[in-house]
């Protein structure tokens, strides 16, 4: 039987690969996809893209984008994030955003974006994206997902005490992955919040921290879920309650010791929660939003990751020269910034154009997969850099 | 020290003798500012432009290839061949050339990037970037260093001694025009030099030679095997082959003409190897200014030449987006005027004529063409025959006499 299968499958596969070779021979030096993309950018086999279908304002500075992903989108689990590539003023930028809905019946996905003041990408997504915009996507990723209840914890009112007890600590846009989980557990409909059997296994407290009440994205969602009785909401607004002190955590969440904590927000909050929980031996899962900003300085160590060499570069001379002095075999050409033969991908770091002073920054997670390509003959290190070479 | 140390020849003047070192610094400062003004405003509009050009080119190419599936029918052949010629010209000029210059690298789009792009030409992008971006753009019009100048096969300046073999350079240049993409591939490989120096076994040469051979095989298979075979159903195998050959030839003639116009018309300066020793950035800028020529014309002309019609601006700023050259051209032209420099710009037919005239003039001994008229033609032809068949001594003696006559007639004219 198996033999029979393989002998019928093999010719089909052979024909397919022949057809593909022929298409490649007919389109070289381009590839068939370059022409197919003219008509069907979302087709199976295409680079993963998504089309923005609608934009829903959440607060004055945050909005939810509903996106139809390309045919090869392989789905996600609530709490996961997606990397989105968007052309901001002509420049391709990548950012990670939490998926705010659980898997939807209509196959759409959504991200909620808060416009960061002085940000490059988020204000663009919130204010300048229009329905129909094509975005670049990567498959959903992230370990920050809702734990599945064990056999002893499966729902029922009589098993009230054996429900899975969770605490979500969120700050600012750190609420977004949590909202994704909550919407999946308790879908909102026109007639109110649905109580699904699978959701009865959870006992959830959300501690949400924000500078002030109206600015809190999903504030209405959270309040709706609370009034439906499916979560307990502890909202702490800096202007109203003062800045959160973790010493008050026991007072805010009396059964803290019984809960597993999921924290999502900026690095400062996560560090504080981690220190607090470590001291008490409490279980904690975290996800950091918005990585640390790179600060440009003068010179820095340049690591050539593939060569396994690190060169201490000063800020006054091109990376190319100093790497060569240190014995790294570098691609090079005109050495004056016009021939583009010395271009190498920078995965992380800041460099300064010695002709103009212009800075180029590569933040992991915010560049295309390979990093940002820089000309090494006219750029000097302006901080620690990692080059893929 | 100035850029041009060359002694002015007969009827020539040093075009930058009037500029002081401070002038050069000021020119460089102004040019840096122009460059910066474009970089500061690069954005959405430019990205939309290149994407639209790429989309248009691919649509034209696809449409033409489809029409050519029935190329046996003459109207289909004409439309398809015209479309494919246009598509190939756009692909080489406004798209390929400019992307490979890194003009669009700032978009950080891996599909429109100098490190990933490959173009519809016999020469592999990587080798072309070395020969063109590095050598030609750096050593623009420096005799002996810039292979684009006569492609290493022609006499390009009066200072190069005339030899009878130069009589053949008109025909050679025409052949090069017809098969331009292969000519480029050969000189990107430095093929002649490799033969001359016996370096055909050199590992670097062999590696590059293999890359060119593989690229040519792919290109030839596409145009002369795959697409003709696809049109075999309509009995159009041979006619599609002919259409593709025609489109390639049209593209070759066009790009050769445009590129000749960039550095070869009368009025464009060439430079001695010695003159660029210790050259400063301002001097480099001025060499680019004087070593390039523009083509004036419509917007369509600029797009079809890949904006190499703005050769001067392109040579000053090789990595600025091509759609911006036209915008900064008035500023650059104004700068030329204020510093008393000659901004060489003429319509295409005039520049092409001028460049070919120079090829013809330099294929003959210095001054021969100028001094020849209907009356003295027999005598001049006799001299040319003597110079072509005689040895170096004969050539030197007769050349001296022609130059003397030329000098005398210039004095009389003055």
Image (spheres, coloured by chain):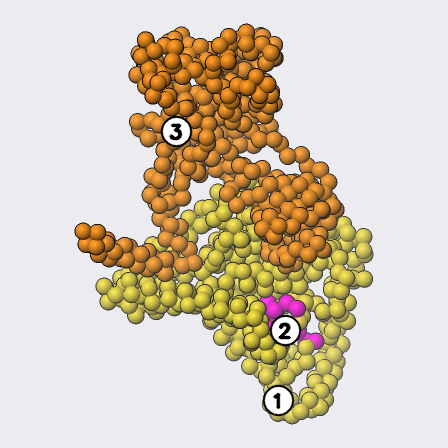
Chain colours: A orange, B yellow
Q: Circle 1 marks a residue in which chain? A: B
Residue B143 visible in the current orientation: yes
Decide which of A152, A272 is in the foreground and name it.
A152
In this picture, which residue range is highlighted in magenta? Answer: B145-159
| Same-chain check, marks 1 and 3 | no
Give the x, y percent position of residue A98. 46, 28
Is there a contact, CB below 8 Å, between mark 3 and mark 2?
no
Q: Nearer the viewer, mark 1 or mark 3?
A: 3
Residue B234 left/right relative to A240: left
Assign the magenta stretch its main secondary structure: loop
Q: Which residue is mark 3?
A: A77
User: Which of the 4 image quarters holds residue B265?
Assistant: bottom right
- For the point 45% across and 65% down, which residue is it? B215
Taking the image as shown, residue A92 lies to the left or right of residue B391, namely left
In this figure, which residue is indicated by the disc labeled 1?
A: B388
Q: Chain of mark 3?
A: A
Is A208 situated above or below B23?
Answer: above
* Left or right of residue B400, residue A80 in this image: left
In the rendering, at what x and y percent does residue B89 appear?
Answer: 45, 59
Front-most of residues B79 and A21: A21
- Above or below, A175 against B236 in this view is above
Res. B377 image quadrant: bottom right
Examine the rendered structure and indicate whether residue B262 appears above or below residue B11.
above
Q: Are marks 1 and 2 in contact (CB under 8 Å)?
A: no
Q: CA distance from mark 3 to mark 2?
A: 69 Å
Q: Could you tell me if residue A65 is visible in this image? A: no
Chain on which label 2 sits? B
Assess whether residue B355 is covered by the magenta stretch: no
Which residue is under mark 2?
B156
- Label 2: how many Cα within 10 Å (few below 14, some 14–19, many 20+): many
What percent of the width, then of the height, locates residue B219?
41, 65
Q: Between A233 and B275, which is closer to the camera in this rendering?
A: A233
């Amino acid at each position: 039987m198996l033999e029979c299968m393989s002998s019928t499958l093999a010719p089909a596969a052979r024909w397919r690969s022949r057809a593909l070779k022929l298409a490649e021979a007919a389109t070289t030096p381009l590839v068939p996809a370059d022409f197919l993309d003219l008509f069907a950018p979302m087709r199976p086999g295409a680079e993963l893209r998504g089309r923005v279908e609608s934009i829903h304002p959440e607060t004055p500075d945050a909005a939810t984008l509903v996106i139809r992903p390309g045919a090869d989108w392989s789905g996600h689990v609530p709490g996961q994030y997606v990397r989105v590539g968007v052309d901001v003023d002509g420049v391709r930028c990548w950012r990670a955003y939490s998926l705010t809905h659980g898997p939807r019946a209509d196959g759409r996905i959504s991200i909620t974006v808060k416009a960061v003041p002085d940000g490059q990408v988020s204000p663009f997504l919130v204010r300048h994206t229009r329905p129909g915009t094509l975005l670049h996507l990567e498959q959903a990723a992230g370990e920050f997902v809702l734990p599945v209840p064990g056999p002893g914890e499966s729902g029922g009112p009589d098993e009230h005490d054996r429900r899975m007890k969770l605490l979500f600590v969120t700050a600012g846009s750190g609420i977004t992955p949590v909202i994704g989980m909550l919407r999946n557990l308790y879908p909102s409909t026109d007639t109110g919040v649905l109580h699904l059997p699978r959701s009865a296994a959870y006992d959830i407290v959300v501690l949400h921290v924000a500078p002030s009440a109206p600015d809190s994205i999903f504030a209405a969602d959270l309040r709706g879920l609370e009034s439906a009785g499916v979560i307990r909401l502890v909202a702490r607004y800096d202007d109203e309650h003062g800045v959160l002190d973790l010493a008050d955590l026991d007072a805010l969440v009396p059964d803290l010791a019984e809960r597993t904590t999921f924290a999502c927000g900026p690095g400062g909050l996560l560090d504080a929660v981690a220190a607090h929980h470590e001291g008490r031996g409490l279980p904690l899962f975290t996800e950091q939003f918005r990585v640390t900003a790179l600060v440009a300085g003068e010179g820095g160590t340049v690591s050539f990751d593939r060569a396994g060499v690190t060169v201490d570069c000063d800020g006054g001379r091109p990376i190319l020269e100093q790497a060569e002095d240190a014995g790294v075999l570098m691609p090079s050409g005109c050495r004056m910034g016009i021939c583009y033969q010395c271009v190498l991908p920078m995965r992380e770091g800041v460099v300064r154009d010695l002709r103009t002073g212009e800075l180029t920054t590569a933040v992991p997670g915010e560049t295309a997969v390979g990093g940002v390509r820089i000309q090494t003959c006219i750029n000097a290190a302006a901080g620690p850099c990692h080059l893929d070479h | 020290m100035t850029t041009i140390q060359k002694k002015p020849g007969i009827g020539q003047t040093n075009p930058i003798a009037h500029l002081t070192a401070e002038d050069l610094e000021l020119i460089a400062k102004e040019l840096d500012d122009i460059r910066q003004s474009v970089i500061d405003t690069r954005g959405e509009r430019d990205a939309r432009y290149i994407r639209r050009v790429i989309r248009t080119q691919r649509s034209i190419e696809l449409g033409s290839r489809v029409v050519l599936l029935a190329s046996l029918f003459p109207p289909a052949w004409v439309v398809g061949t015209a479309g494919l010629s246009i598509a190939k010209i756009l692909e080489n000029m406004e798209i390929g050339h400019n992307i490979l210059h890194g003009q669009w690298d700032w978009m950080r789009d891996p599909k429109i990037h100098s490190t990933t792009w490959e173009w519809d030409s016999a020469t592999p992008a990587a080798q072309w970037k070395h020969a063109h971006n590095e050598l030609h753009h750096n050593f623009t019009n420096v005799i002996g260093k810039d292979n684009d100048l006569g492609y290493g096969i022609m006499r390009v300046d009066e200072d190069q001694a005339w030899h009878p073999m130069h009589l053949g350079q008109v025909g050679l240049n025409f052949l090069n025009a017809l098969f331009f993409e292969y000519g480029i591939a050969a000189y990107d490989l430095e093929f002649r030099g490799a033969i001359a120096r016996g370096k055909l076994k050199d590992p670097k040469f062999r590696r590059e030679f293999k890359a060119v051979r593989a690229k040519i095989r792919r290109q030839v298979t596409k145009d002369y095997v795959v697409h003709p075979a696809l049109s075999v159903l309509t009995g159009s195998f041979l006619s599609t082959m002919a259409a593709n050959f025609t489109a390639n030839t049209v593209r070759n003639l066009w790009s050769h003409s445009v590129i000749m116009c960039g550095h070869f018309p009368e009025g464009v300066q060439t430079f001695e190897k010695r003159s660029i020793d210790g050259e400063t950035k301002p001097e480099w800028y001025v060499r680019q200014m004087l070593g390039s020529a523009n083509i004036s014309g419509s917007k369509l002309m600029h797009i079809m030449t890949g904006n190499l019609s703005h050769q001067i601006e392109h040579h000053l700023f090789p990595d600025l987006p091509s759609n911006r050259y036209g915008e900064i051209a008035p500023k650059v032209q104004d700068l030329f005027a204020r510093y008393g420099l000659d901004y060489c710009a003429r319509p295409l037919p005039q520049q092409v004529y001028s460049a070919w005239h120079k090829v013809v003039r330099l294929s003959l001994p210095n001054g021969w063409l100028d001094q020849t008229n209907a009356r003295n033609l027999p005598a001049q032809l006799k001299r040319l025959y003597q110079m072509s068949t005689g040895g170096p001594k004969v050539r030197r003696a007769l050349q001296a006499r022609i130059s003397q006559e030329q000098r005398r007639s210039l004095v009389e004219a003055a």
